[in-house]
Image: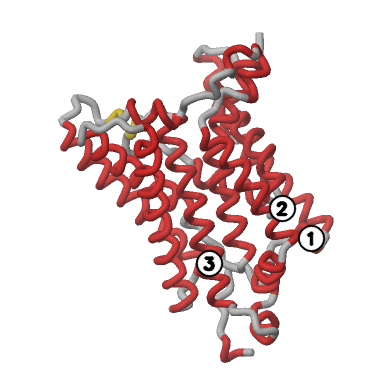
């Protein structure tokens, strides 16, 4: 029997990193920057949080507030640095955004594996991983009354605070983009930076601000994966293709953070659906096909939106293009 009460929480847990990543990338792309380095940013966000938590646990202290704040701040700072590097290369130096993003992904994964391997050696673990159980217990703590609400509590109330924070950030981002002057300026920069510049909008500042904030949000996805979903266990190359799924989710949701809330859960469910089909060697090929579902769905949505050719469903006009003020 297919148990929805078990499946949905696991789909949500799998989808929250995607929600963080897609929300951050949507903000970035709304400014006209195409950051394909999101997988690397999420990786750096995760390892920076692990570094902060590791040394805090080694100090022998166990204050819940600090167990949250230290990894959180470390993750945000590491992700911010990745965003600043990307902006410096693509906005200030006008480097190719596609190449820079791919290089940032490789760089981020390399940084994560280097420091992750170093921490594993310092801890003297017998296995190639480190476990931060004390910090993870704080991050994954459920609402106190979740266990008393039966299936409702299991489906809606059984998550750590970062899961609810991801939903709040996505909804706030959607409101800002759609209903505020800052959002209007951001969309203007992404659509036609020359016109926005002529209207007195600081194009460079908006590109820096949106990209750095987007990277910080995406970095929280890496922190959530390690501290909550993976129960505080870090092992190199464990993220899989979640960063790329987050970028695919941007296209699937047609650049709308509020739609990402439900779409990320759906993607999370599709990502783990193969685990809920019958096991056995005769089903191995079918399982591999099930793993392709999120990407197949994204391609279908991309084809449909391209055929309909509605302007509101298209990416920002200047997406991926460097802005040369002298060319106005």
Callout 2: 10 Å neighbours few (<14), some, many (20+)?
some
Element class at badge 3: helix
Which residue bears the numbered disc 2? Answer: 254
Which residue bears the numbered disc 1? Answer: 312
Alpha carbon separation for disc pair 2 and 1: 8 Å
**Earlier-in-chain disc, 1 versus 3:** 3
**Left-right relation of 274 to 307:** left
Q: Which residue is drawn at 63% across and 23% down?
A: 8
**Quarter-wise, where is residue 93 in the image?**
bottom left
Q: 53 or 6: nearer the eye?
A: 53
Image label count: 3
Callout 3: 10 Å neighbours few (<14), some, many (20+)?
some
Q: Which residue is drawn at 35% across and 39% down?
A: 66
Asked if disc 2 and disc 1 are in contact, CB closer than 8 Å, the reply is: yes
**Earlier-in-chain disc, 2 versus 1:** 2
Which residue bears the numbered disc 3? Answer: 209
């Amino acid at each position: 029997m297919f148990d929805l009460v078990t499946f949905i929480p696991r789909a949500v847990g799998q989808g929250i990193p995607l929600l963080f990543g897609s929300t951050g990338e949507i903000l970035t792309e709304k400014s006209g920057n195409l950051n394909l380095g999101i997988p690397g940013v999420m990786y750096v966000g995760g390892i920076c949080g692990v570094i902060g938590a590791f040394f805090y646990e080694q100090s022998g202290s166990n204050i819940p507030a600090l167990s949250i704040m230290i990894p959180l701040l470390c993750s945000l700072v590491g992700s911010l640095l990745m965003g600043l590097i990307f902006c410096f290369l693509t906005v200030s130096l006008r480097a190719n955004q596609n190449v820079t993003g791919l290089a940032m992904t490789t760089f981020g994964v390399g940084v994560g594996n280097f420091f992750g391997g170093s921490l594993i050696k310092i801890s003297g673990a017998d296995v190639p991983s480190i476990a931060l159980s004390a910090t993870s217990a704080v991050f994954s703590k459920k609402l106190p009354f979740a266990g008393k609400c039966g299936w409702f509590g299991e489906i809606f109330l059984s998550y750590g605070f970062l899961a609810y924070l991801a939903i709040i950030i996505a909804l706030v981002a959607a409101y800002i983009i759609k209903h505020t002057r800052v959002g209007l300026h951001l969309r203007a920069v992404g659509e036609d930076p020359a016109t926005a510049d002529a209207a007195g909008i600081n194009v460079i500042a908006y590109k820096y601000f949106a990209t750095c904030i987007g990277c910080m949000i995406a970095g929280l996805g890496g922190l959530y994966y390690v501290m909550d979903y993976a129960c505080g266990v870090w092992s190199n190359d464990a993220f899989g293709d979640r960063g790329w799924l987050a970028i695919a989710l941007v296209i699937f949701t047609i650049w709308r953070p509020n739609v990402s809330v439900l779409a990320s859960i759906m993607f999370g469910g599709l990502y783990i659906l193969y685990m809920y089909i019958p096991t056995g060697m005769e089903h191995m090929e079918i399982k591999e096909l099930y793993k392709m579902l999120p990407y197949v769905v994204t391609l279908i949505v991309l084809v449909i939106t391209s055929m309909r050719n509605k302007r509101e469903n298209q990416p920002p006009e200047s997406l991926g293009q460097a802005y040369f003020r002298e060319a106005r």
